[in-house]
Structures are given as structure tokens and as C-alpha cells.
Amino acid sequence: MRPVRFNIHPKEAKIETAVSMAEAPNGYSGEGFFTAKLSDVVGLARKNSLWPLPFATSCCGIEFMATAAAHYDLARFGAERMAFTPRQCDLMMVMGTISKKMAPVVKQVYMQMAEPRWVIAVGACASSGGIFDTYSVLQGIDQVVPVDVYVPGCPPRPEAILDGFMRIQDLVANESIRRRNSEQYKALMESYGIE
Ligand code: SF4
């Protein structure tokens, strides 16, 4: 039997080591002032406060549950606020096999999310249909919504999901605040039939 451990002698935590600080964006600082690009400051805030919408349909969803639990602790990235209300989320994480019948639902959920929004395809099924090369399975969610990051694996380990999440953070931090108004972005949305 595993011994039961009680946390009766917690280590004393120092505030300097217990709190991790986000890296400041590049800028100019002097005595009593700091200036940076608005885009970088907005990116910093967005990057560290992503709200995921877990769209989990099968096994990869279980790996995501492990990613969110204490050991891997997605909360370290400021992303512990998961919700199933698309209007409050900005990161759709699709994890699992998506049937063709389910595809319009994925698209509808995506369209209900407010801009700016990002998408991760977690695992082989969401990325490409995986082993299910059949008449009923969507061969990748990028057939219905634009995907920003693909996480390979069947299933990907939580470390791989975290890596995918950090790639999204890089995209978010470096995205220009004007990108969503650009002609290229509008053309991308139009190619998916999204206005
Ligand atoms: S990629 Fe593999 S583990 Fe993930 S949902 Fe598909 S079959 Fe399951």
C-alpha cells in the first residue's frame, strides 16, 4: 500500500521564488519609464491569459485531462480557465476523432468564438483523420476551420500538448494587432465560408 503523506511541514515559500514573472516585451526603459510597442504589450497579455475551449471527442481528450491536472498543470501558462462557452474562449483545442456529422458543429463553435481566436488540432485524428481513413471521419479539422498548430501523436503525450500550447503562445505574442483586419486574413476566412 502506498504510504499516506500529510503536508504538515510545508516548505516555506519565498515570494521571490514562488511567483514567476512574465518576460517584459522589448522596449526602451529609463529612469521611471518604460516604452514598448502596443502590439507587444497586447500580445504579452493575450499570451498569458488564453482561455481554452476543449472540444474533446475521444482518447486524446483524456491526455488533455492529464495535461490540465496537477502534474502537468496547464495553469502554469495562465490557461486553467477552460469553458464550454465559445463566446468566452479564444483558443479552441480539438482533441479526438471528428466525424463528418460532427464537422458542422466544430465550425459552428468556432464561429461563435470572438476574434481573436486560435485553433490547435491535438493528435492524429484532429490533424488528419488519423487511422480512420473511412467514409464517416473528417480527414482533418482544417477542412472546416483554419488551424494554427498541429500536435502529432496517437495520442500525443501531455508534454507534446504543452509544446503545442507554447507554440500557440509564440504566435499570439508575435501577432500584429492589425492582422485580423488584413486582406489576407479576410481571404483566409472567406476560403472557409466564414465572414
Ligand atoms: S489520435 Fe489516436 S489517441 Fe487521439 S483520438 Fe485519434 S485514435 Fe484516439
Image: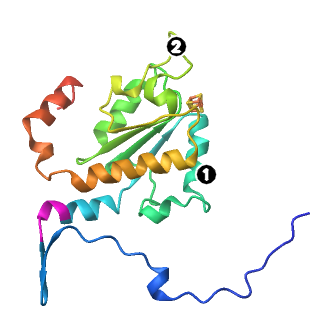
Q: Position of residue 54 (x, y in %)?
A: 47, 45
Q: Tag 1: Cα neighbours inside 10 Å, few (<14), some, or many (≥20)?
A: some
Q: Main secondary structure of the magenta part?
A: helix
Q: Quadrant of residue 93?
A: top left
Q: Is residue 84 visible?
A: no
Dot placed on the residue nearer the N-terminal end, 2 or 1? 1
Kind of residue indicated by mark 1: Ala
- Reply yes or no: does residue 64 show up in magenta: no
Asked if ligand 1 lies within 8 A of label 2, the reply is no
Q: Which residues are magenta?
A: 36-40
Label total for image: 2
Tell me the element at label 1: helix
Which dot marks residue 133?
A: 2
Q: Disc 2 versus disc 1: distance between alpha carbons?
A: 27 Å
Q: Quadrant of residue 81?
A: bottom left
In the rendered image, the vertical position of residue 66 relative to residue 97, given as above or below: below
Tell me the element at label 2: loop
Residue at 45% across / 23% down in the picture? 128
